[in-house]
Image: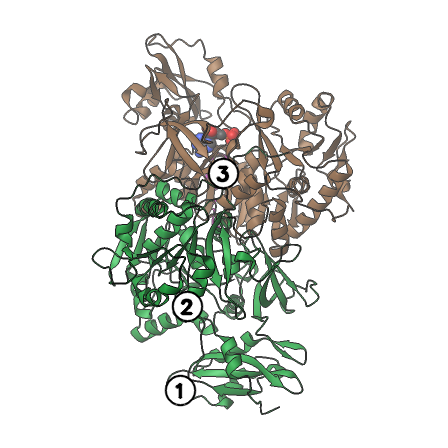
Chain colours: A brown, B green
Amino acid sequence: MKGLMQDWQLTTNKILEHAKRINPTREIVTRRVEGNIERTTYGDLFDMSKQVSTALQDEGIGLGDRVATLGWNSERHMASWYGAMGIGAVLHTVNPRLHPEQIAWIINHAEDKVLIFDKTFLPIVEAIKDNIPTVKSFVIYAGADTMPENTLGAVPFDIWIDGRSQNVRWGDFPEDTACGLCYTSGTTGDPKGVLYSHRSNVLHTMITMQRDAIGMGANDVVLPVVPMFHANAWGLTFSCPATGANMVMPGAQMDGASIYELLDTEKVTITAAVPTVWLMLLTYLQENDLKLPHLNKVIIGGSAVPEKILRAFEEDYEVDVVHAWGMTETSPLGTLGTLPPHMLDADIDTRMAQKLKQGRPPFGVELKIVDDEHNDVAWDGETSGRLLVRGPGIAAAYFKGAGGKVVDEDNWFDTGDVANMDQYGTMQITDRAKDVIKSGGEWISSIDIENIAVGHPKVANAAAIGVYHPKWDERPLLIIQPVEGETPSKEEIFAALEGKIAKWWTPDDITFVDNIPLGATGKINKLALRDTFKDYKLPTA
Amino acid sequence: MKGLMQDWQLTTNKILEHAKRINPTREIVTRRVEGNIERTTYGDLFDMSKQVSTALQDEGIGLGDRVATLGWNSERHMASWYGAMGIGAVLHTVNPRLHPEQIAWIINHAEDKVLIFDKTFLPIVEAIKDNIPTVKSFVIYAGADTMPENTLGAVPFDIWIDGRSQNVRWGDFPEDTACGLCYTSGTTGDPKGVLYSHRSNVLHTMITMQRDAIGMGANDVVLPVVPMFHANAWGLTFSCPATGANMVMPGAQMDGASIYELLDTEKVTITAAVPTVWLMLLTYLQENDLKLPHLNKVIIGGSAVPEKILRAFEEDYEVDVVHAWGMTETSPLGTLGTLPPHMLDADIDTRMAQKLKQGRPPFGVELKIVDDEHNDVAWDGETSGRLLVRGPGIAAAYFKGAGGKVVDEDNWFDTGDVANMDQYGTMQITDRAKDVIKSGGEWISSIDIENIAVGHPKVANAAAIGVYHPKWDERPLLIIQPVEGETPSKEEIFAALEGKIAKWWTPDDITFVDNIPLGATGKINKLALRDTFKDYKLPTA
Ligand SMILES: Nc1ncnc2c1ncn2[C@@H]1O[C@H](COP(=O)(O)O)[C@@H](O)[C@H]1O
């Protein structure tokens, strides 16, 4: 027997329609690439997005067609999303930090028909324009007056939508219709596309709106530093209009001074970004003796939160840090580190130790940890295994079947992360499966070693990788990028590790480099490091 | 093109599974009908619910079969819900405050096969037992030692589930499967059943978990005074386990002293009930000079919040009042009165005036106000019309087609309420469509008149109804139930109304009664009043 409730399809257009009706005057504040600040409302955004829909339809775009963006966080970028999604086109966010060749490869794989981009990326687009034959039109986020010269026959976004009809019908399709496309550059093989549906985006939005997840309300002012091309800005482009929170969009400027200026002038209450961004901000705050009186909560994810960032926010600035874990394939939020009830009265060190873990899954995300035989391991806060995840916001396959079957018979998706869980569902990532160091068949967590090393005042960044060892198969090598002007010794670093990790986890050697290479989403590029150090001879070997 | 995300069906069993995994030690504290306090955890509740499923299966209950409860809020009642819903049976909450004949009518209409009830209601069940032939088994919420004598061949609940297998599979059906049944006693015609689906209950849960809706977190302690038989306890039986909030269940005792005791000893942070309950509590607090140091938020709905209740909570006890509107057909929450951004800095009177309105719809609820020709009226905070509603938690039809077609071609459900909306989506109920007083073709809001009258210190309750007038067709008669021991005069009441409503809204007469009749959900029974006063001759007539 079926229930007799309404068939209200979960399509993303309903989010902006809600904002238009209920919070029409709440704002999106954008720093333009030209540097000036632009203020828009959800009411305006709705109108702009409808015009984008008409502009796209006039280009022949319809259900299932891919529309690509190479864009910073801005209200124009958001209008492109809602405009494309509303008519059932697929909005494809391309990561501009990738190599131009990879960008071209991705655009071709996606068969994008329209490319809308910020002028910052004009050189990239000019460089690849002859290699992306599916793209028929180019649009640049600019007005008539700010339009750069180009050889693409591109139109300025503002002119492109100007005067177009807003009478286009949105959401005229089932909720499992494709809605967004985001490629994730696995460390092996070609990039793979995650194809979000309207349903998955709407449910991810509802999941993250829970108070213990992001939990913003209409009274919040949210600054997503995390880019819209990085796993949907963690869903903030949906959850902010859904709640009516104001948004502050940093455009191209994510340095400490620029972010601080926005936090301060716009009285931002919630912000979100990867650790690197916060390191820049904290340095700027310290150098200029500034405070953060308006900020309540900072969501940090994408890679593990270093203790010095956590402590600085919590202790020096009284900002609640919510450590979050997720991935492109999980829409992306999977766990969030809001303190659980049994930790509320714990002492500061216990609370900080809890917050260094990746957090707990909200309702709508299921986690499982398994050993090599696919058996559940104990949730004891110690035993680690492969982290599997399941839910309405989790990928079931990649675009065009890339990578083959990615879920098991019970729909569990293997994250490639290695983690443990405690009895209250707190998850702690101990490694990437492919980064784990296997010494004599036992796992050593590279992340643990790195976190401690990065805590040393002379260390800017650290990476532990496994290198060949004749007896143990692999042993850890620790690679250190010193703080500028500092020259730490091996002994100092070994001393910092001592007593904090099991003795047999101690790296067999430490080496210093000027720069640890980062990937396109700001994470350490271990593939490159493993390549560089593939012939490294350990003193113990 | 379809998205490639997981097909994770929205079934209610996933809520309790989440609680079991992530918040297994969070508690449900129940006041038994025997008076003692029982403590259970979500972990225990999960186990109990699984055993209920097996017990039901052993009675031959399966997909689509109706299982009825006549129960107070308790952990055993919750286990019955999850146990029945998990195997795809339909949990039918029967309102014990209805007349026994009506209860029998409803059970027969629903064709309930099992009836599980609190011993408080044994006399009712004994009285109707020969008239409910579909019911094959009776279960009483009791243990072996607390089981009452009966002629039903009933089993005690604890024995019924004791030792049963927990190995039953849950959620093995599509999300649009029927899940819950609740009859609403319309003021005309027979009661009509709202047939919730798993999907509608899960989505309603996610909607109400938004911070500006109920917004509880794992750290909250929630006391649902609102009964589980009254529109699903406003969804708290789902949203609390979904977030991991502790629950405090008042059982049969809802007087001021009993509720205060639970609020205080259990350190309740959020509670919810109809205004009548709060009147009792506030009287008790004042008489005993008590405070509410733990309570943060009180959700009040079911009928309009009187200003004296609002002000008492906000000003005397520093508790945030969230006025909520909804109905059985809306799962039930439709709007919630969390202060919108533009009201945060307003003075206290402006804020209180805002909070007397019924609030704003969260994402997932769409509202529309139309005039008699079904045209949208302006959202100006003044023009009122019929309130229509749409969303995944809104009824599309009644059980067995009762009442015929209840949504229009665009799926809008007519609530039967009359309301206005302001430009920020704040909805204000001005009347029930059938209670509206039509004077010379113009509408007079009975609720406005009642609210002002109830604000008078000598008035305990008030009802305005339209009675026959030869010239105006209908004119308002105001019926007053004085506070015990008080004898207000007509002049005093007219003076209280003066200047607060339009002159032509002033009642043509005032009359005093010992008792204003209430319906089964605690609301004024205007049908009965209209009947009593149908031949009332107004002095102006
Ligand atoms: N809070 C975190 N701590 C550690 N690793 C993380 C965290 N958040 C994300 N990651 C890593 O980033 C991966 C996802 O990368 P991406 O899809 O590019 O966002 C995850 O599988 C993790 O390995």
**Quarter of the rendering occupied by the C terminus of chain B:** bottom right
Say left or right for B496 vs A24: left
Q: Which residue is mark 3?
A: B8
Q: Which residues are magenta?
A: A277-294
Say left or right for B288 vs B210: left
Alpha-carbon neighbours of circle 2 within 10 Å: few (<14), some, or many (≥20)? some
Mark 1 residue element: loop
* Residue B505 point in image, percent of width and height: 60, 81
Residue toward you, A169 or B321 = A169
Q: Report the amino acid beneath label 1.
A: Glu
Q: Main secondary structure of the magenta part?
A: helix
Asked if labels 2 and 1 touch by Cβ distance under 8 angstroms, the answer is no
Alpha-carbon neighbours of circle 3 within 10 Å: few (<14), some, or many (≥20)? some
Q: Nearer the viewer, mark 2 or mark 3?
A: 3
Dot placed on the residue nearer the N-terminal end, 1 or 2: 2
Mark 2 residue element: helix
- Extreme residue in the bottom direction: B539
Q: Which residue is mark 2?
A: B313
Q: Which residue is mark 1?
A: B486
Query: What chain is tagged by disc 1?
Result: B
Instruction: Tell me the distance, in whole angstroms, between the alpha carbons under discs 1 and 2.
Output: 25 Å
Alpha-carbon neighbours of circle 1 within 10 Å: few (<14), some, or many (≥20)? few
**Quarter of the rendering occupied by the N terminus of chain B:** top right
